[in-house]
Amino acid sequence: MTTLEQIENAAHAFGLCVRGLTAPKSGDSVPEGTETVVLLGPDEPAFWRRFATSAEYSDNAPDPLDRWSKRIITEFASEWGGVGLFPSDGPPYPPFFRWALDSGQAWSSPVQLLVQAEAGLFVSYRGAVALPFKLKPRTLSESPCTDCPAPCTTACPAGALGQDQDYDIPACKAHMRSAEGAGCVSGCLVRRACPVSRNFRRDPAQSAFHMAAFLEE
């Protein structure tokens, strides 16, 4: 049976890391017999360098990062005796947000985005692997928001993200397309305001890539 250490080592080789483990609940979109869901996210700063040298990055076809993620994680899943799961699968869509919370490695931040102890508000999940056996998680972390002054709540110049409010996507995009929105186009100011995010070493080119894709949606 594949061990957690083997999974972590394989993920690291491709610029990914294990961002949490959880057990699925009844009704989740997982294969029958799934015992563990392994959440996989970017391992910075290696992740962007790995993706930027891939065939998907330069082939000019749509959704390069999603296609790269599916290729890599599907290969992992096959090697580990599991099945790859992705946020775009559906409907019904796998409950990645809830899985992240259930893993004990991520929390809902004051601006309602997920926050994680190592990645801060830059946490993301490229996919997951459903395994037919149980894995014991590492020691659980504590929310970085507990003693934080929450600069994320006042960082959005468009007022699209704030304390306990719904994300106003139209306002966000409108600001980004305006003359005043140049600072946001290179990376979300709310995510960058998180003290943990500042130390995450995410490549600025990656943030710009995500923001450009967001504007095209």
Image: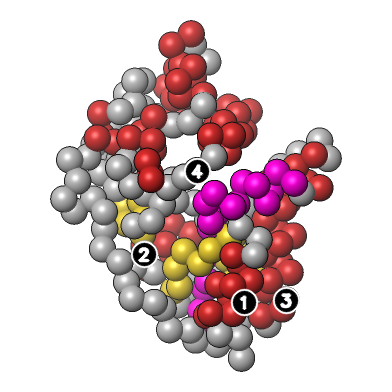
For disc 2, the marked residue is 105
Ranked by sequence position, the earlier of labels 3 and 4 is: 3
Earlier residue among tags 4 and 1 = 1
Structural distance between the alpha carbons of marks 3 and 4:
29 Å
Q: Quadrant of the C terminus?
A: top right
Q: Quadrant of residue 129?
A: bottom right
Disc 1 on helix, strand or loop? loop
Query: Helix or strand or loop: what does disc 4 sit on?
Result: loop
Would you place residue 182 above or below residue 60 in this image?
Answer: above
Q: Residues within 10 Å of mark 2 (few under 14, many from 20)?
A: many
> CA gap, disc 4 to disc 1?
33 Å
Q: Position of residue 163 (x, y in %)?
A: 23, 36
Q: Which residue is mark 4?
A: 202
> Mark 2, mark 1: which one is toward the viewer?
2
Q: Is residue 56 left or right of residue 212?
A: right
Q: Looking at the picture, which amino acid does disc 3 mark?
A: Ser
Q: Nearer the viewer, residue 174 or 42?
A: 42
Over which residues does the magenta segment extend? Answer: 34-53
